[in-house]
Amino acid sequence: MKNIPDTPEGIILESLLEGMAEYYSAELSQKVKRGMNQTRQKGNFTGG
C-alpha cells in the first residue's frame, strides 16, 4: 500500500481504502455469480 502516515488522519484513510477494496471484491463476486447464473439459465457451459 502507499505510505500512509501513522496519524489519526492516516488511520481514517487506511480504513477507507480497506473498506473500498472489500466493497469492490464483494460487488465483483456478486456480478460474477449473477453472470454465471444467467449463462447457465441460457443453457451454456460455464466451465468446470
Image: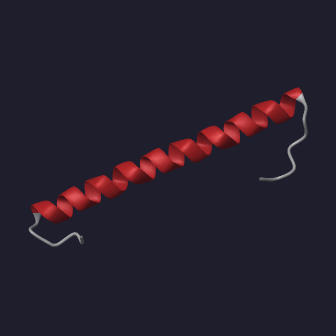
Is 11 displayed left or right of 19 in the figure?
right
Q: Is residue 36 left or right of residue 14?
A: left
Residue 1 falls left or right of residue 20:
right
Measured as percent of width and height from the top left, residue 30 is found at: 36, 48
Closer to the camera in the image, 45 or 34? 45
Image coordinates for residue 32, horizontal then vertical, percent: 34, 57
Residue at image point 15% right, 63% down: 40
* Residue at 45% across, 45% down: 26
| Rendered location of residue 31, percent (x, y) | 35, 54
Q: Is residue 37 above or below residue 23?
A: below
Residue in view at x 27 percent, y 60 percent: 35
The image shows residue 6, relative to residue 27, as above or below, that is above
Residue 8 in the image: above or below residue 43: above
Q: Examine the rendered structure and indicate whether residue 1 appears above or below residue 15.
A: below
Residue drawn at x 70%, y 34% is 15
Q: Nearer the viewer, residue 9 or 3?
A: 3
User: Residue 38's x, y, as percent?
Assistant: 19, 59
- Residue lying furthest top: 8
